[in-house]
Image (cartoon, rainbow, N blue to C red):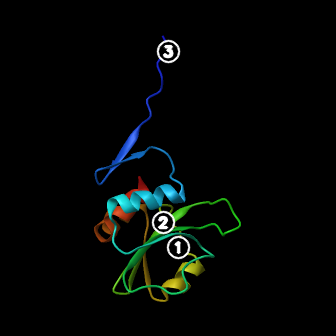
Amino acid sequence: MYRPIKKLRISVEGLELPNKPLSNIGLINAVRKLEIPEFRGVFVRDNLPVKGKRNECGILNLDDASGRGTHRVVWYRKNYENYYFDSYGIQPPREIIEYLKDLILYFIQQSVFNLKEKCSAVTNVYTF
């Protein structure tokens, strides 16, 4: 007997999301629904804003603007204290270091819970 495959969904902070990678638009919509404060947006590494803000967070695709996208990371800044999360544990690229202009504390997968305390909803949307 044939049974259709049930599409799974994931709950993030009470928001139901599809169990698949989200597009930039899907990420932005999720962030809006979660009402994440001071979210700058989703960027590629060679198209970051010109100037950072004192408090902000964002999602960065490590590809450049000419590519189709590779791997996304998250940054969070509170009072110019910078945090960076990469699920692969790779150090921040030159572009985000130059953008944030200050020391960056970066986290690997084992430290995701520490970052969730700082940037809970953005990290949850990103890591589901």
Relative to 125, does residue 19 appear above or below in the rendering?
Answer: above
| Kind of residue sitting beneath label 3 | Tyr
| Kind of residue sitting beneath label 2 | Asp
Nearer the observer, disc 3 or disc 2?
Answer: 3
* Mark 1 touches mark 2? (CB < 8 Å): yes
> Which numbered disc flags the more N-terminal residue, 3 or 2?
3
Nearer the observer, disc 3 or disc 1?
Answer: 3
Instruction: Depth check: give the residue in front, 6 or 103.
Output: 6
List the residue tagged with mark 3.
2
Write down the quadrant of residue 34 in the picture: bottom left
Provide residue 20's location: percent of width, then percent of height: 49, 45
Q: Secondary structure at mark 3?
A: loop
Asked whether, in this view, residue 92 is left or right of residue 75, the answer is right
List the residue tagged with mark 1.
91
Q: Residue at x 36, y 82 (%)?
A: 55
Q: Is residue 72 visible?
A: yes
Provide residue 41's location: percent of width, then percent of height: 48, 70
Asked whether, in this view, residue 61 is left or right of residue 29, the answer is right
Write down the quadrant of residue 110 in the picture: bottom left
Mark 3 is surrounded, within 10 Å at the Cα level, by few (under 14), some (14 to 19) or many (20 or more) other residues, namely few
List the residue tagged with mark 2.
86
Mark 1 is surrounded, within 10 Å at the Cα level, by few (under 14), some (14 to 19) or many (20 or more) other residues, namely some
Provide residue 124's location: percent of width, then percent of height: 37, 58
Q: Secondary structure at mark 1?
A: loop
* Mark 3 touches mark 2? (CB < 8 Å): no
Q: Residue at x 38, y 64 (%)?
A: 122
| Kind of residue sitting beneath label 1 | Gln
Q: Residue at x 39, y 62 (%)?
A: 31
* Mark 3 touches mark 1? (CB < 8 Å): no
Q: Is residue 110 visible?
A: no
